[in-house]
Amino acid sequence: MYAGTRGIRGSYVRVNRKTRKIYYVFPRNQQLVTLDWDELQPMAGYVPIVGAGGFTSRHPLCLVGVDWTQSPPGEVSVSCGNLGWRDQGESARGLWDYMQRFMEDGMRGLPAPPPLPPPMSRKQTFLYGYRQWATKFRDDLATPKGKRWALLWAPAKVLWLITMVFPDSIGDYLDYTIPEIRFPKEIDQLCGFESSGRTE
């Protein structure tokens, strides 16, 4: 699972069935956080987003626990994966159910997670949001309902392009050279990854 914020690369959340712990490295200070799975309190977060294009919200899965490796121990909240755009927390619940089943039975009976996409060039990263927007625009226009309401929703789509897609694309372009967060080698080895610093 992946978590991240604008202006900084995110970090993966490692879930280990053998140790029954989750591991996370905070991007800003590179601090490793270790939380006991059995003490976690899951919750659907609420992230209001206000922009020139209007108001929306996201609902990531937040895992709250105590990191006993700190001195003194402190409560930590890790926001991971599945941002859940305007779904009132449904995607967060689905991700939590998936994680619980994994901790109980491993991958038996669970759908395999999608493969990580191949890395994109800086140009591809910049254009990704535009291509998604253009595909959705064409698909909406091809439906009878879309054609009927085109005079109303087409200007709204263009406004969304200017106020949301364009700033996100600029941010992705600027963030491109920021390195991904790495786990300590001992956590790589504990979780069965190569010691080369792989972060999947």
Image (tube, rainbow, N blue to C red):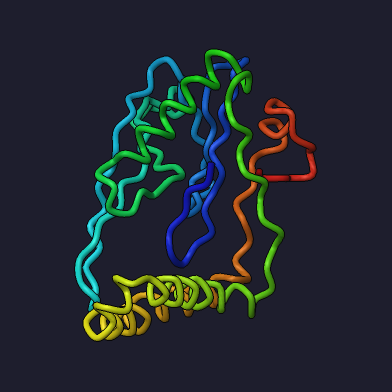
Query: Is the residue 126 above or below the residue 77 in the image?
Result: below
Closer to us: 154 or 62: 154
Q: Relative to residue 32, is residue 61 drawn left or right? A: left
Closer to us: 137 or 64: 137
Query: Is the residue 2 above or below the residue 70 in the image?
Result: below
Q: Residue at x 35, y 32 (%)?
A: 93
Q: Residue at x 46, y 20 (%)?
A: 36
Q: Relative to residue 90, is residue 178 drawn left or right? A: right
- Numbered disc total: 0
* Farthest front residue in view: 144
* Residue 194 position by quadrant: top right
* Residue 163 position by quadrant: bottom left
Q: Residue at x 64, y 41 (%)?
A: 183
* Residue 164 position by quadrant: bottom left
Q: Residue at x 30, y 83 (%)?
A: 154
Query: Is the residue 10 above or below the residue 71 in the image?
Result: below
Q: Position of residue 117 (x, y in %)?
A: 67, 56
Query: Is the residue 169 above or below the residue 56 in the image?
Result: below
| Image quadrant occupied by the C terminus | top right
Closer to us: 139 or 77: 139
Q: Position of residue 129 (x, y in %)?
A: 49, 73
Q: Position of residue 147 (x, y in %)?
A: 32, 79
Q: Position of residue 123 (x, y in %)?
A: 64, 80
Q: Relative to residue 160, is residue 171 drawn left or right? A: right
